[in-house]
Image (cartoon, rainbow, N blue to C red):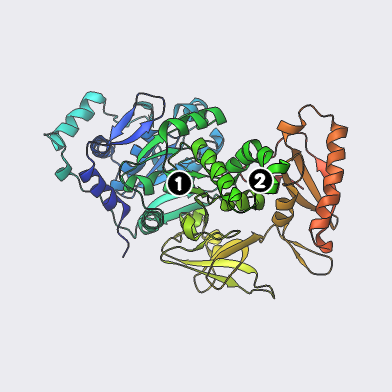
């Protein structure tokens, strides 16, 4: 039986009571593990004062910060249900999700509240507390909100002496609902993914076993904590391993991020492919495109020296102490992936989805195989449904990480599972003999060729993204023909005219069609005048483009 992650956290608190656990980067705000434990207990007292019971829903909507983590862990250890809502949703969407989730309390960041305060909050919300200092920014009429003195008095009455490690034991029933995570905003029937403690704990234990870390290592949290990828990989797993986490409380611009990495020197970087692809295009591609570098890249002895220098330079850009570089959320450009593997960079690309909290597949860098999402993680099974002659079919999963269902959405829940209980991922892929997962694309994005061939737009996009001046691309189908939408790489094209860019794209189209099968040839490239819209994990919102 998987041990609850809160028990791991309790053990770490006991051993590292005075070590720093959470820090807001470039701000005077941090918690030691002992202070974190104490603050969680203080919030428990406040929940009691407000009449919040075990199993009640408590929402968090705000940018990453130490208090986001404190609120989350306080809710989990109180055995409440955390409703994590992305701060990038509109105020209208957030208000809608608060109502749909039956939330009774809201922790809210100032950035979100600035817009949300103009919305009518659901009747069920008793109060909204600022993530900055826990002060109430909204209290429902008739609710007795204790002021600071009353709250402190109630805490002192329950814990009359200073909290010590032996006073702390956090745990929860692993089978009960622990988290509702929304995959989208206000749709007709929102999909609130319900995860129990077992799912979250198995995800944490996978991280601890696959990417072991010594206590006291450091990490920069840059992905949204309300997204499962960031929540597990940049908060729960590292914190339960004794890591000191630094939160980027402002939008992580390249300059802020690079400075933070240099200052913090993290052991682990968790990111989406878009980040490393931009670094590759800006820093590595100009170097590796030089004729003399290409000539010596595969020359014995010189090659190993050259690759080691490239690797050292890249590790230095990430702070110099990097042990693991984990990518997820989308497919990585194959040329970038090959380069990183050539220089023995500690790369691993996982596979997952919110409905699995999020891990399905993964491997430590030592065993990572190119173009895969790793092998099924501990306590998870993967199989291919109705594979074609190439072994490709929909990826189905079963195991401890799988969700309980979608909150108040039985129709969507039923559609998500097969009759015998396997979760439909909606992804097309295949397995090799070692169970490595090869992802070919989404079921919904696959096109059927004129002669019945399966066409995976992601594979075409991979090749097009490597062409000159292409920033990002998207393949769409129009009247039986494939059309590529391209947003140019502005670092290369900002001084070019539209006609010059289109001329490059015409050449790109000719090159592209020589690289792909005849049944998937692209008829035209259309240049977009503004960037594609992205999801929080930086993949393009395909449904917006036709």
In this picture, is 487 found above or below 304? above
Task: Tell me the CA gap for discs 1 and 2.
Answer: 25 Å
> Is residue 304 at least partly visible in the picture?
yes
Q: Which numbered disc flags the more N-terminal residue, 1 or 2? A: 1
Residue situated furthest front in the rendering: 301
Q: Identify the element where label 1 is drawn.
A: loop
Q: Identify the element where label 2 is drawn.
A: loop
Residue 128 image offset from top left, x and y in percent: 39, 32
Q: How crowded is the residue under tag 1: few (<14 C-alpha within 10 Å), some, or many (20+)?
A: many
* Residue at screen point 38% across, 49% down: 237
Name the quadrant of the N terminus: bottom left
Q: In the depicted view, which residue is nearer to us: 303 or 411?
A: 303
In the visual, does 381 lie left or right of 464? left
Label 1 or label 2, whichever lies nearer to me, is 2
> Is residue 116 at least partly visible in the picture?
no
Q: How crowded is the residue under tag 2: few (<14 C-alpha within 10 Å), some, or many (20+)?
A: few
Residue 82 image offset from top left, x and y in percent: 39, 45
Residue identifier under label 1:
101
In this picture, is 384 found above or below 222? below
The circle drawn on residue 491 is none
Residue identifier under label 2:
541
Q: How many marks?
A: 2
Residue 34 image offset from top left, x and y in percent: 23, 37
In the visual, does 233 lie left or right of 53? right
Residue 266 image offset from top left, x and y in percent: 42, 39
Q: In the depicted view, which residue is nearer to us: 148 or 378?
A: 378
């Amino acid at each position: 039986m998987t041990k609850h992650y809160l028990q791991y956290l309790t053990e770490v608190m006991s051993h590292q009571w005075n070590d720093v656990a959470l820090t807001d980067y470039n701000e005077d705000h941090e918690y030691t593990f002992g202070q974190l434990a104490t603050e969680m207990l203080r919030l428990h007292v406040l929940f009691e004062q407000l009449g919040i019971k075990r199993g009640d829903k408590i929402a968090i909507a705000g940018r990453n910060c130490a208090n986001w983590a404190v609120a989350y862990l306080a809710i989990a250890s109180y055995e409440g249900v955390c409703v994590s809502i992305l701060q990038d949703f509109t105020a209208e969407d957030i208000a809608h999700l608060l109502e749909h989730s039956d939330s009774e309390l809201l922790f809210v960041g100032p950035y979100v509240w600035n817009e949300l305060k103009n919305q009518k909050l659901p009747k069920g919300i008793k109060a909204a507390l600022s993530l900055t200092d826990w002060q109430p920014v909204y209290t429902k009429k008739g609710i007795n909100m204790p002021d600071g003195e009353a709250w402190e008095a109630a805490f002192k009455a329950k814990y009359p002496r200073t909290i010590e490690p032996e006073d702390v034991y956090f745990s929860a029933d692993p089978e009960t609902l622990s988290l509702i995570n929304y995959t989208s905003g206000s749709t007709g029937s929102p999909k609130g993914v319900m995860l129990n403690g077992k799912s979250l704990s198995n995800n944490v234990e996978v991280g601890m076993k696959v990417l072991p870390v010594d206590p006291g290592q450091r990490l920069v949290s840059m992905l949204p904590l309300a997204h499962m990828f960031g929540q597990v990989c940049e908060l729960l797993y590292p914190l339960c391993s004794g890591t000191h986490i630094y939160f980027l409380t402002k939008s992580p611009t390249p300059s802020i991020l690079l400075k933070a990495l240099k200052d913090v020197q993290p052991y682990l970087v968790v990111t989406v492919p878009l980040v490393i692809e931009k670094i590759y295009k800006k820093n590595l591609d100009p170097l590796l495109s030089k004729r003399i570098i290409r000539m010596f890249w595969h020359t014995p002895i010189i090659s190993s020296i050259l690759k080691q220098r490239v690797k050292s330079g890249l590790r230095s850009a990430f702070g110099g102490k990097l042990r693991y570089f984990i990518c997820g959320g989308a497919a990585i450009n194959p040329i970038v992936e090959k380069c990183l593997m050539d220089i023995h960079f500690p790369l691993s690309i996982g596979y997952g989805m919110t409905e699995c909290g999020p891990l399905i597949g993964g491997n430590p860098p030592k065993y990572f195989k190119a173009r895969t999402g790793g092998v099924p993680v501990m306590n998870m099974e993967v199989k291919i449904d109705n594979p074609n002659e190439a072994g490709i079919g929909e990826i189905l999963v079963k195991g401890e990480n799988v969700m309980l269902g979608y909150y108040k959405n039985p129709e969507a829940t039923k559609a998500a599972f097969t009759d015998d209980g396997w979760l439909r991922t909606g992804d097309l892929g295949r397995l090799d003999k070692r169970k490595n997962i090869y992802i070919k694309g989404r079921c919904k994005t696959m096109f059927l060729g004129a002669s019945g061939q399966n066409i995976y737009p992601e594979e075409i996009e991979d090749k097009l993204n490597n062409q000159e001046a292409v920033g990002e691309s998207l393949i769409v189908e129009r009247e039986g023909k494939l059309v590529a939408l391209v947003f140019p790489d502005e670092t290369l094209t900002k001084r070019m005219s539209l006609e010059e860019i289109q001329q490059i794209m015409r050449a790109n189209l000719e090159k592209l069609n020589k690289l792909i099968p005849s049944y998937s040839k692209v008829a035209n490239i259309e240049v977009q005048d503004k960037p594609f819209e992205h999801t929080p994990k930086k993949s393009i919102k395909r449904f917006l483009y036709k």
